[in-house]
């Protein structure tokens, strides 16, 4: 198998799952709800232990959907942009491809066993990125458009009861409503404050992601002015997560939150079987060992450190800007920390 064949298999066969004899026994004797929960807590995908609170939330969502004979619903909150520090900016690349394939493989057993199927909502927070990262609107729109095109490519090979949807948090509001809700959440956080340790971390991430000459040109700010700006942006970056309408959509009692790292009352499945870096703030590469290929999403820093070691291999699979080649490493990568810089 070569990279082209491996990636074609990821695209076309990720949703294929044949129920085993053991699967059928669980469904028959313990019920479809038990089967679904067991698949969701599979160690093959799960990266951290499911705490009791998360287990209760997940089981309730399964029960509510099964009782109404509705699809099992998942939300995957994400940035809704590509970090500017990668050459694939501003569109999706193999990182999004690998993460989507990973999610499809995760939910495929449910779609195979449960006729109403599965719905996965990729919930983009691009609206806040204009403010906290100074990203130009046209770059964010290019990313979202390319993300939708990639979902369409995967959808060609999905069963009718497995649906992938891009959903923008911005669509829950008018622009004025969002601004008012964001300011209200920010004011509430200002009253509470952010711990000094957290402020240092948030400002570090803000500076890393910030586009100096983006929506607005901030290149002439002094060091003191930049410091003050990043402190102000930190409060927006921390508070938008608590906006009620956004939270109500992502955290509805009939939905299950999945993510690449641990979140409260959610399932941590990583971004691929081997990595946890966030796909929108990373890039996808292949590792080859003993003639087998492995997906890996790496951060901008990891990409800079390792890119010269990889071989560029031409690929003809998806007619989009960042899918004409893939970087292949002739070894398994081993990073002490596989978390994104975002």
Image: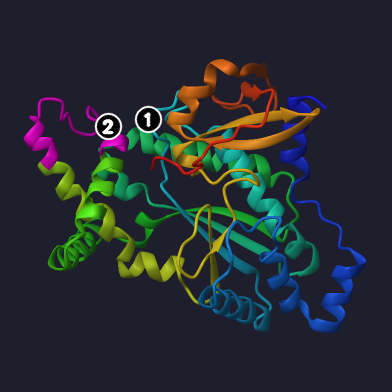
Please name the residue shown 65% across and 69% down the image: 71
Would you identify the image quadrant in which residue 296 lies?
A: top right
Percent across and percent down for residue 169 are 38, 57
Seen as rendered, the residue at the extreme front is 336
Is residue 225 in the magenta section?
Answer: yes
User: Which mark is on residue 84?
Assistant: 1
Point out residue 127 in the picture as x, y percentages from the top left corner: 32, 49
Q: Taking 30 as reference, is 307 left or right?
A: left
Give 87 or 285, whichever is nearer the viewer.
285
Using a 10 Å C-alpha cutoff, classify the residue at mark 1 as few (fewer than 14 neighbours), some (14 to 19) or many (20 or more): some
Q: Is residue 174 visible?
A: no
Q: Which stretch did the figure color magenta? A: 207-227
- Residue in the image at 19% along x and 62% along y: 180
Which one is in front, 46 or 27?
Answer: 46
Q: Is residue 3 left or right of residue 204?
A: right
Mark 2 crowd level (few <14, some 14–19, many ≥20, 10 Å Cα)? many
Residue 192 vs 59, above or below: the answer is above
Using the image, determine if residue 149 lies above or below residue 319.
Answer: below
Would residue 62 appear left or right of 336 to someone viewing this image?
A: right
Q: Are marks 2 and 1 in contact (CB under 8 Å)?
A: yes
Q: Which residue matches tag 2?
A: 211
- Residues at marks 2 and 1, CA–CA distance in whole angstroms: 7 Å
**Quadrant housing the C terminus:** top left
Quarter of the image where one finds residue 170 = bottom left
Estimate the x, y position of residue 283 in percent, counting from the top left: 52, 32
63 versus 273 height, above or below: below
Q: Secondary structure at mark 1?
A: loop
Residue 46 inside the magenta-drawn segment = no
How is the protein colored in the picture?
Answer: rainbow
Mark earlier in primary sequence (2, 1): 1
């Amino acid at each position: 198998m070569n990279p082209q064949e491996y990636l074609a298999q990821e695209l076309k066969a990720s949703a294929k799952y044949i129920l085993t004899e053991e699967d059928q026994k669980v469904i028959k004797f313990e019920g479809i709800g038990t089967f679904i929960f067991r698949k969701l807590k599979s160690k093959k995908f799960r990266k951290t232990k499911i705490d009791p609170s998360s287990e209760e939330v997940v089981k309730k969502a399964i029960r509510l959907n099964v009782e109404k004979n509705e699809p099992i619903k998942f939300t995957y909150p994400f940035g809704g942009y590509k970090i500017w520090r990668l050459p694939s900016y501003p569109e999706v690349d193999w990182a999004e491809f690998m993460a989507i394939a990973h999610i499809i493989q995760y939910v495929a057993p449910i779609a195979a066993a449960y006729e109403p199927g599965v719905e996965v909502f990729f919930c983009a927070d691009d609206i806040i990125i204009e403010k906290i990262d100074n990203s130009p609107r046209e770059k964010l729109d290019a990313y979202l458009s390319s993300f939708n095109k990639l979902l369409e490519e995967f959808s060609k090979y999905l069963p009718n009861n497995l649906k992938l949807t891009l959903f923008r948090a911005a669509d829950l509001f008018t622009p004025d409503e969002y601004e008012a809700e964001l300011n209200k959440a920010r004011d509430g956080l200002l009253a509470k404050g952010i711990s000094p340790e957290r402020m240092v971390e948030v400002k570090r991430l803000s500076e890393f992601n910030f586009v100096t000459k983006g929506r607005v040109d901030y290149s002439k700010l002094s060091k003191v002015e930049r410091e003050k700006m990043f402190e102000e942006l930190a409060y927006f970056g921390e508070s938008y997560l608590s906006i009620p309408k956004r939270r109500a959509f992502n955290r509805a009692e009939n939905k299950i939150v999945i993510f690449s790292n641990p979140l409260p009352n959610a399932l941590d499945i990583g971004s691929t079987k081997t990595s946890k870096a966030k796909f929108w703030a990373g890039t996808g590469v292949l590792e080859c060992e003993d003639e087998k290929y492995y997906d890996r999403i790496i951060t901008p820093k990891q990409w800079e450190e390792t890119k010269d070691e990889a071989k560029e291999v031409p690929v003809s699979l998806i007619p989009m800007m960042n899918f004409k080649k893939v970087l292949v490493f002739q070894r398994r990568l081993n990073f002490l920390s596989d978390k994104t810089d975002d």
